[in-house]
Image (cartoon, grey):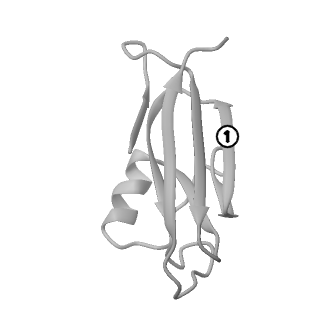
Amino acid sequence: MALTNSEQDSGDIVKYEVTVTGSTGIDCLVFQRDAYDSYADGARDVSVMSEYSRLDVSETEVTEQIDKGEYMFVVDHTDLLTEPSTVPVEVSFVVQMIEPP
């Protein structure tokens, strides 16, 4: 899911809520656009924006000020950062860019 924080777009804060049904955690990753493009092409040595990402979670809520730029939010259940289980999981999530209160 694309996250854009620019002069033309509203919202300086990324907010997401994730809930996992299953016995294993997932990674909620935020990439800069170039790193995401490499990830999507199969690279697994890419960097994530650790200040906005959460690893091995079954439930999380994040509300963080985000720098200007173009980012991608990914729910990851591969071995990129956290070893996945072979047991399937179901993930519910909401991601949005919001204005400061």
- Indicate the quadrant containing the C terminus: top left, top right, bottom left or bottom right: top right
- Indicate the quadrant containing the N terminus: top left, top right, bottom left or bottom right: top left
Q: Nearer the viewer, residue 48 or 27?
A: 27
Q: In the orientation shown, which residue stands out farthest toward the left?
A: 41
Residue at image x 43%, y 55%?
35
Whether residue 16 sits left or right of residue 69 in the image: it is right
Whether residue 25 sits left or right of residue 79 in the image: it is right
Residue at image x 58%, y 50%?
18
Q: Nearer the viewer, residue 67 or 98?
A: 98
The residue under label 1 is which amino acid type?
Val
Whether residue 27 sits left or right of residue 93 in the image: it is right
Q: Nearer the viewer, residue 42 or 99?
A: 99
Q: Dot 1, how many residues are within 10 Å of its Cα: few (below 14), some (14-19), or many (20+)?
A: some
The secondary element bearing badge 1 is classed as strand
Q: Where is residue 20 in the image (x, y as percent from the top left)?
A: 59, 62
Q: Position of residue 40 (x, y in %)?
A: 33, 63
Picture quadrant where residue 67 is located:
top right
Q: Where is residue 90 in the image (x, y as percent from the top left)?
A: 49, 66
Q: In this view, does 33 lie above or below 20?
A: above
Question: Which residue lies under the disc numbered 1?
Answer: 62
Residue at image x 65%, y 77%?
23
Q: In the orientation shown, which residue stands out farthest toward the front?
A: 21
